[in-house]
Amino acid sequence: MRIVDAEVVVTSPDRNFVTLVLRTDDGLTGIGDGTLNGRELAVVAYLREHVAPLLLGRDAHRIEDTWQLLYRGAYWRRGPVTMAAIAAVDVALWDLKAQAAQMPLYQLLGGASRTGLMAYGHASGQTLPELVESIHARLEEGYRSIRVQSGVPGLRSIYGISAPSPAQPGQETHPTQGSPVARPAEEDWDSRAYLRHLPGVFEAVRAEFGPELPLLHDVHHRLTPVQAARLGKDLEPYDLFWLEDCTPAENQEALRLVRQHTTTPLAVGEVFNTAWDYQTLLREQLIDYVRSAVTHTGGISHLRKLLDQAALHQIRAGMHGPTDISPVGMAAQLHLGLAIHNFGIQEYARHGALTDEVFRQTSTFRDGHLHPGDEPGLGVTLDLEAAARHPYRPAYLPVNRLADQTVHDW
Ligand code: EZ4
Ligand code: CO
């Protein structure tokens, strides 16, 4: 099975996606996601200029060898652009191998360890009534676990809080989405105001929805270790499923202090790109969930190694699944999540109708659980004609500033 063509497709149905399409001499087509939100074209250039020429003529069955060639062969290791490009190749090769075997991909990863993947959706509100309405909307859509993000009095706009939308109340929108101006939006931050306000929000949500509903919260790297420790303690009465990215965790040792002070479970790592970023976190068991996505961590091959290592420390997978992971990347992690033993939960933000036209999918979402389907391969096909109708649109994530205009983590 020789690779005869490697095409990089950029499309922007509801937002930008980068897809690698590999074609083989026996007529199969495999696809992989290389979408890196806000830096998409850097991955496109990496793939087109430096990776595609190396793939032509190679045996598509040699997934591990190709991974090692791209990782070690570049000499320059790690980094989000490199690891997204390698992920696109890796997932396209797994798609091809599973199609050649005429099996759904999860079978090649060891077979199903469960019947479906518990998924959580995003609810948010600038005010408490908006938040409660947003949680009801997710429950009606079938979600059985909810990420709760709230506005903070005095702060104008905060990332992750969507403008009220009649179609999808509480779904996360991105401020620059669809905007012709390629400039990040600027948002506000005040950690003290946030720390005062958030526990009351969770108290009210628990009072409204009861003790059973799994609730999650994302801090977006905004706190210092001592602030994060306090927040974890203050939220203990509300029994969170996890507290995500409470500090900028590239300083792995910082999580020691948080861990010593709270039993609120911790999730980290959506911005990481290799297993090396987790060495201290895993060895010292400082977190409970690994947030890495297949698309941003070198594909199925590398993330599998990281998750197997995490399993030895009772740490589970909670793979990143916002809409900036394409349906191809999502399918890859559904197959992986179905197969591994240490699956925890899957983030799932629904794509828009245009995206579903460009990427035809076999996955299902029923009673709060995702399943990748049983078609051979990933179960996703890319409609090239539909993709071509939606050219790339520059879009950036927002930046965050304190009242005195200091740039802050978000
Ligand atoms: O901010 O995917 O947990 N989910 C998140 C996401 C990320 C975006 C960044 O591209 O934090 O919403
Ligand atoms: Co996050």
Image (spheres, rainbow, N blue to C red):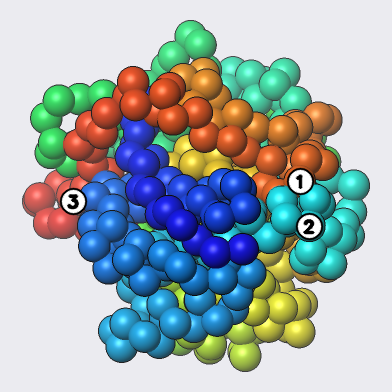
Query: In the structure shown, which secondary structural element does the residue marked by tag 2 occupy?
Result: helix
Q: Quadrant of residue 202?
A: top right
> On the rendered structure, is 320 left or right of 238?
left
Residue bearing the label numbered 3: 402
Sequence-first disc among 1 and 3: 1
3 or 2: mark nearer the eye: 2
Q: Amino acid at mark 1?
A: Pro
361 lies above or below 342: above
Q: Nearer the viewer, mark 1 or mark 3?
A: 1
Q: Residue at x 12, y 38 (%)?
A: 183
Secondary structure under tag 3 reads loop
Q: Which mark is residue 101?
A: 2
Q: Amino acid at mark 2?
A: Ala
**Residue 345, image x, y percentages:** 71, 53
Q: Quadrant of residue 307?
A: bottom right
Mark number displayed over residue 376 = 1
Tell me the amino acid under the disc marked 3: Leu
Location of residue 21 in the rendering, given as x and y in whole percent from the top left corner: 46, 48
Q: In 3D space, how far apart are the residues under numbered discs 1 and 3 (Cα atoms)?
A: 50 Å
Label 1 secondary element:
loop
Label 3 crowd (10 A; few <14 / some 14-19 / many >=20) = some
Question: Is 346 on the left-hand or right-hand side of 24?
Answer: right
From the viewer's perspective, is residue 118 above or below residue 100? above
